[in-house]
Image (tube, rainbow, N blue to C red):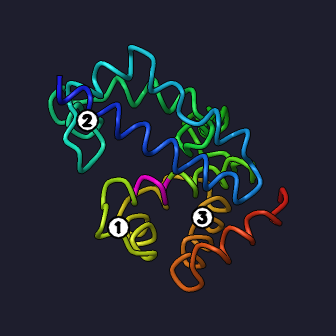
């Protein structure tokens, strides 16, 4: 029971923070609809089962089963994840990353900042989302233009703070 409540509270705290961040950068509607798939049974049940409180339950599900069904469901329904933006290249005959539209890069930024705040709690710093990005493999898995833009935004957050970064995001238009 507590595990389930903990997961639901974490999801709600995260969504609330994303909504606030999305409003600050001019995409409130996206914030309101952010991550609603987490309330589907495909994502909710594993989220509760693998809840830890300090990191995504998807990591624990992946460790247990070798894959995360919840993550596969989630990334296929939420356009703010760069993994959504892949398609089959008929020439190379492999999946390739596609450049993300700006409004989804904005939401991805808001999502990453909110997730870092939720999981790191009082240890959060404005450099933490950038550190996480640079320490992972996302940069090499997303379209180069998307990766450059996201890194620029995360560096701006670290160097200039939230207020200035969200103001900049509000003015950012499609490529």
In the image, 119 versus 131, the foreground residue is 119
Quarter occupied by residue 59: top left
On the rendered structure, is 64 left or right of 147?
left
Residue 54 in the image: state x and y as whole percent.
23, 50
- Disc number lying in front (1 or 2): 2
Q: Which residue is mark 1?
A: 135
SS of the residue under disc 2: helix
Q: How crowded is the residue under tag 3: few (<14 C-alpha within 10 Å), some, or many (20+)?
A: many
When the figure is inspected, residue 88 is found, relative to residue 121, above or below; the finding is: above
Q: Which residue is mark 3?
A: 150
Identify which residue is drawn at 28% across, 23% down.
46
Residue 7 in the image: state x and y as whole percent.
29, 33
Magenta-colored segment: predominant secondary structure:
helix
Q: Earlier in the sequence, mark 2 or mark 3?
A: 2
Q: Could you say which disc has been placed on residue 6 in the image? A: 2
Q: Could you say which disc has been placed on residue 169 in the image? A: none
Identify which residue is drawn at 22% across, 31% down.
61
Quadrant position of the C terminus in the picture: bottom right
Q: Earlier in the sequence, mark 1 or mark 2?
A: 2
When the figure is inspected, residue 126 is found, relative to residue 16, above or below; the finding is: below
Quadrant position of the N terminus in the picture: top left
Residue 86 in the image: state x and y as whole percent.
60, 38
Identify which residue is drawn at 45% across, 56% down.
138
* Distance between mark 2 and mark 3 Cα atoms: 30 Å
Q: How crowded is the residue under tag 2: few (<14 C-alpha within 10 Å), some, or many (20+)?
A: some
* Distance between mark 3 and mark 1 Cα atoms: 14 Å
Q: Magenta stretch containing residue 113, yes or no?
A: yes
């Amino acid at each position: 029971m507590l595990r389930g409540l903990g997961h639901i509270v974490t999801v709600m705290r995260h969504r609330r923070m994303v909504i606030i961040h999305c409003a600050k950068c001019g995409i409130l509607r996206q914030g309101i609809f952010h991550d609603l798939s987490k309330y589907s049974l495909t994502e909710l049940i594993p989220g509760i089962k693998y809840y830890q409180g300090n990191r995504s339950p998807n990591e624990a599900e992946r460790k247990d089963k070798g894959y995360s069904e919840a993550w596969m469901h989630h990334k296929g329904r939420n356009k703010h994840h760069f993994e959504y933006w892949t398609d089959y290249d008929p020439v190379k005959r492999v999946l390739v990353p596609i450049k993300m539209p700006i409004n989804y890069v904005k939401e991805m930024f808001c999502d990453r900042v909110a997730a870092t705040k939720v999981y790191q709690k009082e240890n959060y710093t404005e450099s933490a989302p950038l550190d996480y990005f640079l320490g992972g493999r996302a940069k090499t898995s997303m379209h180069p233009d998307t990766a450059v833009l996201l890194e620029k935004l995360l560096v701006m957050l670290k160097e200039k703070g939230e207020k200035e970064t969200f103001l900049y995001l509000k003015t950012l238009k499609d490529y």
